[in-house]
Image (cartoon, grey):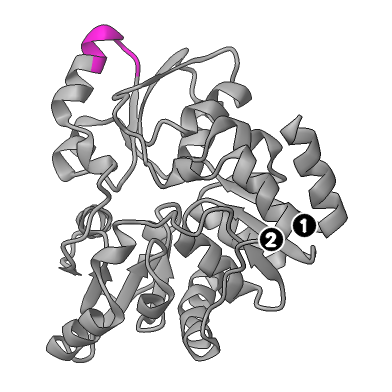
Amino acid sequence: MLSAEIRALAAERKAVILAHNYTRGEVQDVADFTGDSLELARKAATVEADVIVFCGVYFMAETAKILNPSKTVLIPDPTAGCPMADMITGAQLRDLKAQHPGAMAVCYVNSTAEVKAECDLCVTSGNAEKVMATVPRDREVIFVPDSHLGDHIATREGRTYVLWPGYCPTHARLTAKAIADARAAHPGAPVIVHPECARDVRDAADERLSTGGMCRYARESAASTILVGTEVGLLHRLRQENPEKTFVPVSEALVCPNMKKTTLENLAESLREMKTPVEVDPTVAARAKRAIDAMLAI
């Protein structure tokens, strides 16, 4: 079986396998650790193994390399990108900062290393509210690249951010009508959605949570059925951890093609052939690490 071969190869290579909650179920099952962006960043920073194999999208593997530069970081499919991260470049952010001198530049972790390098602070969907609460209220804030997450935090804080018009194409597919239809089909079941969703979708839900937050909510909720509005890969973990509960996707259309690019086949090949190593320019990495470290310190 490929799973057994992968575990044997990981032991041979002294490798740890990290997988995002949105990856395929069989990939999550073979990983050493599964989590959301915040959990994976924390794990990557403290890994003692020689090799980190990152099952997710490229910016995540890049972040792992920035946090633990002495390690070999592999990504099974280097074409697994993030459309949201690609919606802004370092040059575009520099231009925006020039238009708002003195503003604090904050990036969502779903951004490239060159964008992180231009920022003062990095956040994830799991810690954004806590981290942004430390920013002085009289300080202007530029938030990139996700306009929906930025709007979510700004609304909760009762303040205004300069938002870049980026978004997650997968979460953009979720509609308030889909939530209404799901509620009608499952009366009384709570709806949880990701803060990357549009405002009307967030407003229609009961809770707005990162995937890590959704896992905690599922464990603690008394509800027997929960309607889940995020990438469908998360349901694998939710069902495994809470077999006595029922989890229903609000929409089956919430599939991220990039998160599904990691397979058992290319994961095994990555370990067999030590491919594909992720490299980050040391100067860019050093600047990007400051923004990430500022987040992790909080």
- Residue 150 marker: none
Residue 188 visible (yes or no) = yes
Amino acid at the residue labelled 1: Ala
Q: Position of residue 11 (x, y in %)?
A: 85, 51
Is disc 1 placed on a helix, strand or loop? strand
Where does the N terminus fall, quadrant-wise? top right
Residue 187 magenta-drawn? yes
Q: Is residue 239 magenta?
A: no
Q: Which residue is mark 1?
A: 15
SS at circle 2 = strand
Three-letter code for the amino acid on which mark 2 is drawn: Ile
As drawn, 208 above or below 151: above
Q: Residue at x 43, y 59 (%)?
A: 124
Q: Callout 2: few (<14), some (14-19), or many (20+) C-alpha neighbours within 10 Å?
A: many
Q: Is residue 268 left or right of residue 233?
A: right
Residue placed most toward the observer, 162 or 12:
12
Q: Quadrant of residue 262?
A: top right
Task: Give the residue displayed 14% in from the left and 24% down from the top.
Answer: 177
Extreme residue in the right direction: 12
- In front: 47, or 273? 273
Give the image quarter of residue 151. bottom left
Residue drawn at x 36%, y 35% as measured from the top left:
255
- Residue drawn at x 46%, y 36% is 214
* Segment colored magenta: 182-189
Q: Residues within 10 Å of mark 1 (few under 14, many from 20)?
A: many
Q: Nearer the viewer, residue 62 or 212?
A: 62
Query: Would you say the residues marked 1 and 2 are in contact, meaning their CB atoms lie under 8 Å apart?
Result: yes
Q: Is residue 138 visible?
A: no
Which residue position holds label 2? 52
Report x, y in % for residue 91.
Answer: 25, 84
